[in-house]
């Protein structure tokens, strides 16, 4: 007869008990250390992100006085505030709200959700959005709501930035504390997303080759503007379709300069920057993002996006060759070099005979290819993980004291 199974003893139960309660504290300790690592690493990254963009002290003092002592700007400010109830909401986000009034766009800034990065030198403790000094540095200044004529700016960049009509601090009905307001002209052509929708909704929208032939010179002018900006020592850091405005078919104006930073800014080496697959050299990053933005515009506006997707990975179409040649050496790319490459890969309006629309191919194949193209030319930037793990929702985002 076989032996009877032994019943578990009190000693074995005690061993399991102690083993279980030794592992649990170790797991808790590891999770705590990981949380602390993420907390401090992301806090440091956000602190770098919200650190100021440096301009010369004399320049910033002139800028801070411009809004206070310029009579025309003060007159426009009073007119806008007196007619606040007539402002029309254009958009709202974490950084603030955007309104329109007649031929002007008014942007307000929520400092509770997105810290004001720059300090005003002439008044201790006073902060203002970096978009204001950046817009004044690159954009021409005008207070004429009817005439957006180009005026003198203080940078060496071409005058293809939004002019500044006024800027000031004022309270609003929805905020108890004063908010900064930046006033710029309304661009009737809208941004590139709006332009692509208008083109796509035409009765006979053009092909991507026809669009490329029409807008490639405009893309070259954009790269020339970026090159001048980079030689001035700054990067835009947020080139995308919603930040480019269509003044006419030959000129795209660069807007939303709230992320402009000097080339050596510490944000360009942070964890947030790397996790968003941005290039360490912000000048190369601007150039690549400009190319991706141009591709997004062509794809969204063209009548043949399926052929665009098919040709994108074929590496034979001039557009495809331009993209993949750029990406091979993207880390050392520049706006000037990309412009030269674009000239060498001139737009083609001749359709290859061996390329047919993929309407008969399987739907999953087309969807997979569409997603792959979107991933390749995407320009999204996301700091949600940083805000979550740094507990900005509890402690607020970090900022450097003035």
Image: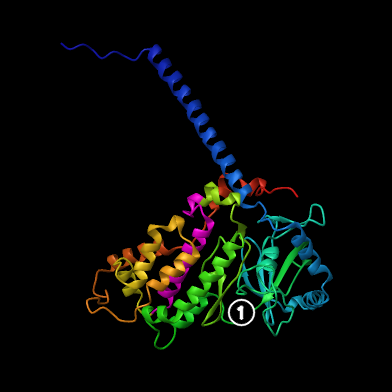
329 lies left or right of 141: left
Query: Does the magenta segment cover residue 178?
Result: no
Relative image position of residue 135 (x, y in whole percent): 67, 67
Q: Against 52, is 294 above or below?
A: below
- The one nearer the camera, 181 or 332, is 332
The residue that label 1 is drawn on is 187
Whether residue 202 is situated above or below residue 178 in the rendered picture: below
**Percent coordinates x, y for residue 177 in the rendering:** 78, 60
Compared with 382, 40 (above or below) is above
Quarter assignment of residue 255: bottom right
Give the image location of residue 134, x and y in percent. Answer: 67, 64
Residue 152, position in %: x, y? 70, 75
Question: Magenta region, mostly helix, strand or loop?
Answer: helix
Of residues 285 and 114, which is closer to you in this image? 285
The colour style of the image is: rainbow
The residue positioned 53% from the left and 59% from the top of the image is 283
- 83 displayed left or right of 6: right
Residue found farthest to the left: 1
The residue stretch that appears in magenta: 274-302
Is-magenta flag for residue 286? yes
* Residue 85 occupies quadrant: bottom right
Name which residue lies at 66% across and 47% down.
398
Q: Kindly identify the residue that appears in the image at 33 percent across and 70 percent down.
A: 309
Residue at the bottom extreme, as displayed: 203
Q: Mark 1 falls on what kind of element? A: loop
Mark 1 crowdedness (10 Å alpha carbons): few <14, some 14-19, many ≥20? some
């Amino acid at each position: 007869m076989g032996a009877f199974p032994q019943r578990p003893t009190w000693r074995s139960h005690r061993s399991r008990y102690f083993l279980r309660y030794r592992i649990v504290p170790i797991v808790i300790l590891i999770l705590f250390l990981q949380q602390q690592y993420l907390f401090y690493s992301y806090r440091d990254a956000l602190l770098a992100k919200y650190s100021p963009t440096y301009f010369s002290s004399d320049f910033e003092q002139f800028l801070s006085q411009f809004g206070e002592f310029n009579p025309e700007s003060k007159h426009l400010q009073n007119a806008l505030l007196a007619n606040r109830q007539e402002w029309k909401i254009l958009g709202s986000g974490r950084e603030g709200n955007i309104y329109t009034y007649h031929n002007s766009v008014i942007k307000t800034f929520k400092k509770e959700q997105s810290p004001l990065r720059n300090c005003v030198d002439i008044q201790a403790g006073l902060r203002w959005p970096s978009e204001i000094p950046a817009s004044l540095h690159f954009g021409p200044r005008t207070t004429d709501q009817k005439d957006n004529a180009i005026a003198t700016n203080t940078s060496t960049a071409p005058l293809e930035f939004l002019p500044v009509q006024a800027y000031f601090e004022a309270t609003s009905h929805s905020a108890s504390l004063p908010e900064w307001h930046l006033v710029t002209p309304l661009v009737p052509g809208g941004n590139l997303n709006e332009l692509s929708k208008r083109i796509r909704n035409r009765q006979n929208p053009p092909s991507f080759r026809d669009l490329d032939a029409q807008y490639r010179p405009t893309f070259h002018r954009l790269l020339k503007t970026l090159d001048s900006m980079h030689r001035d020592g700054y990067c835009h850091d947020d080139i995308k379709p919603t930040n480019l405005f269509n003044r006419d078919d030959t000129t795209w104006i660069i807007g939303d300069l709230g992320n402009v930073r000097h080339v050596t800014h510490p944000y360009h080496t942070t964890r947030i920057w790397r996790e968003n697959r941005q290039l360490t050299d912000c000048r190369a990053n601007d150039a690549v993002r400009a190319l991706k933005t141009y591709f997004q515009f062509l794809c969204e506006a063209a009548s043949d996006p399926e052929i665009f997707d098919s040709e994108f990975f074929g590496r034979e179409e001039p557009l495809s060759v331009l993209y993949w040649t750029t990406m091979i050496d993207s880390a050392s790319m520049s706006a000037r070099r990309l412009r030269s490459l674009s000239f060498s890969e001139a737009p083609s309006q001749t359709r290859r005979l061996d390329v047919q629309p993929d309407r008969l191919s399987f739907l999953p194949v087309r969807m997979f290819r569409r997603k792959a193209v979107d991933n390749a030319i995407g320009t999204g930037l996301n700091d949600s993980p940083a805000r979550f793990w740094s507990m900005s929702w509890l402690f607020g985002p970090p900022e450097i004291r003035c």
